[in-house]
Each structure stands twice: as structure tokens, then as C-alpha cells.
Image (tube, helix red, strand yellow):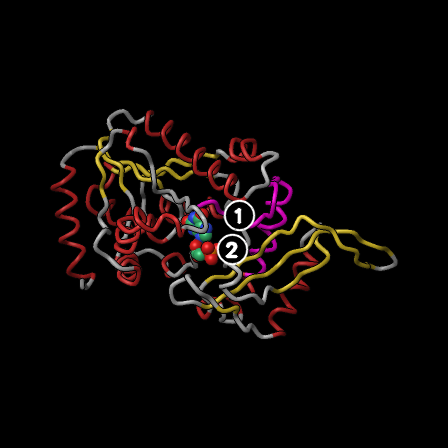
Amino acid sequence: DWTMPEFIPEAVARIREQVGDEEVILGLSGGVDSSVAAALIHRAIGDQLTCVFVDNGLLRLNEAQQVMATFARHLGMRVIHVDASERFLQALAGVTDPEAKRKIIGRVFVEVFQEEATKRPNARWLAQGTIYPDVIESAGSKTKKAHTIKSHHNVGGLPETLNLKLLEPLRELFKDEVRELGIALGLPHEMVYRHPFPGPGLGVRILGEVKREYAEILRQADAIFIDELRAADWYDKVSQAFAVFLPVKSVGVMGDGRTYEYVIALRAVQTQDFMTAHWAELPHALLGRVANRIINEVRGVNRVVYDISGKPPATIEWE
Ligand code: XMP
């Protein structure tokens, strides 16, 4: 067990010793682990670190701007922002199977990252935010593969073909230690205590085929939900909360007119380990405010439902 004031100088010394004067690249996702790894490595070697942030078109509202504001402007890090949204959406066109979607998103990410890596021929290291539970899980996964329900695709998992040495300064830390470290390194509380967000992003929260139009609707609905959760002090009381886009239309009424528009489902769960989960008993008034705002503010949606399924038998994500 580490306390972070002891850990930082030791980790910084170790990174400097490992890396020397060589260049490092890191795939920044905006999630807690890659963010903390980036901040720690930057503390150690400054501009020898280049972060690559890939916008796959499946991020939450204003995510790219927030990542650039925090890392590039506030922390002064070198971050390359790659807008690859068109490429991801084209690769996903016509694809409806959830596992096929995950594989495509994972594959295109690796391609885009590799292209960026090739533009930095002096890079010798690939940094990743691997934490202790990931190390355990991947050690076990060789025998437990048959039990995998969803193949997980993260910013990690880059192939060895990159021919880079691996730098993984969080390998010994548990999640709560990573969060403590993030705070000690000056990352905003909001970033360090974020709910987990899946690697394939909104790609697995838009059921069936992914379209730009659907992603735009979902982004707005999701932002309203998260906004209201924070305002009501519920964000930190749930383990994960998000909106899901259902590509079905139902009939509604507005003024004298009949509407025929899409459905948004809201999901909020409480869990210790994400292996099992309970749906969160959010106050009805809060759910009502969220539904009203989504229907009034997001064009294309006329119905909002709340998911009251536990895991098992449902999973947390809808795909
Ligand atoms: P499920 O839906 O399997 O989700 O109950 C459990 C947790 O895993 C996250 N999740 C993913 N994370 N890549 C990820 O990085 C993925 O493909 C993926 N699928 C699910 C999910 O958000 C929840 O926290």
C-alpha cells in the first residue's frame, strides 16, 4: 500500500531512470487511468511525453474540448487531438451487431494511433494507464476466456507491432490509489471521480447501427442527465449513469400535433465491482426533471424511460 506523497517522488525518479532522454507517446482517453498516467509521466519528463487524443465521434458532449482544456492548456502538456470521427462512423456504417461494432472501433483506434505514432519516429516508449486490477485480470483471462461476455476495447491493447517499450507507472496501484494520485498531481476532482466510460463509447449506447444523427441526440440527452444528477448531488451516489439511444419511434403529442420520434432510456446503477449491479432508486422528481428537459430540449426525442433491470440478468450497458 502506497501513500501518494511517498509514491510521487519515487515514481518520478523511476520514470526518469527508465526513459532517460527518449520520447514517450501515450493514448489519452479522458478516463481516469490514462489521465493520471499522463499527469505523472509529464511531471517526470515534461515535453518528452506526447499524448494522442483520438476523437472517435462517440464521445460525450464537449469531451474533446474538456480534455484539451485540462491537459494542453491547464497542465501545459503536449497533446495531439486527432479528429477521426468520420473514419469511425464510416467503418461502422451498416453494422448492427454489438460485438462487431466493438471490434471495428478497437481496430480503427489502433490504426489511427499507429499512424500518429509513425509521425513521431523518435518515440521509443508507449505509456499506458494499466492499473493493478488490469494486470490481475489479463493474467487470469488466458484461462477464463470462455466466460467473457463482452470483449472489452480500451485505449490499451495496442499491438506489439508498434515496436515500442511499455511504460506503465500505475501497475502497482488500485483504483482508489490512482484517484488519490490524480488529486495529488493537480487533476480536477471532476475528472478523477468520473464514472467509468466504455472504450467503444456511445457506440455501444446507440443500439444497432451507429449514425451521426443518433450520436448527436444521445450526447445531448446524456449531458442533461449527468447535469441534473450533479445538481441534485446524486452523481457521486451512483457508480455509473448514462443515457441510451433506442432507434425506435413512438407516437407523442405536442400542441395540436402528433409527433413520431425516438426513445431515450436512462440507466443508473450502484455496484461495488461492476460484476453485479442494482438499478439506482433515483428520486422520482429528479427523473421527472430529466425527462422533461430531454423532451423539451433535445430535438427528435418524445419519450424517456428508466431502466429498472438488475445485473444479472441485464448487463449495465445495453450492448
Ligand atoms: P456490462 O455492460 O458488461 O459492463 O455490465 C460492466 C462495466 O464494463 C464497462 N464496459 C466496457 N468498458 N470497453 C470498456 O472499456 C467495453 O467494451 C466495455 N463494455 C462494457 C461498462 O461501462 C461497465 O462499467
Q: Is residue 95 magenta?
A: no
Front one among 253 and 220: 253
Could you tell me which quadrant the N terminus lies in?
bottom left
* Residue hosting label 2: 317
Q: Secondary structure at mark 1?
A: helix
The reply to whether discs 2 and 1 touch (Cβ–Cβ < 8 Å) is yes
* Towards the viewer: 133 or 148: 148
- Where does the image place residue 106, in percent across and percent down from the top left? 43, 38
Q: Is residue 123 visible?
A: yes
User: In the rendering, at what x and y percent does residue 171 appear?
Assistant: 23, 51
Secondary structure under the numbered disc 2 in the rendered image: loop
The answer as to whether callout 2 falls within 8 Å of ligand 1 is yes
Mark 1, residue position: 204
Instruction: State the extent of the magenta-drawn residues as a range.
Output: 198-225
What crowding class fits label 1: few (fewer than 14 Cα within 10 Å), some (14-19), or many (20 or more)? many
The answer to if 199 sits in the magenta stretch is: yes
Query: What residue lies at 43% left-to-right and 59% top-to-bottom?
Result: 195
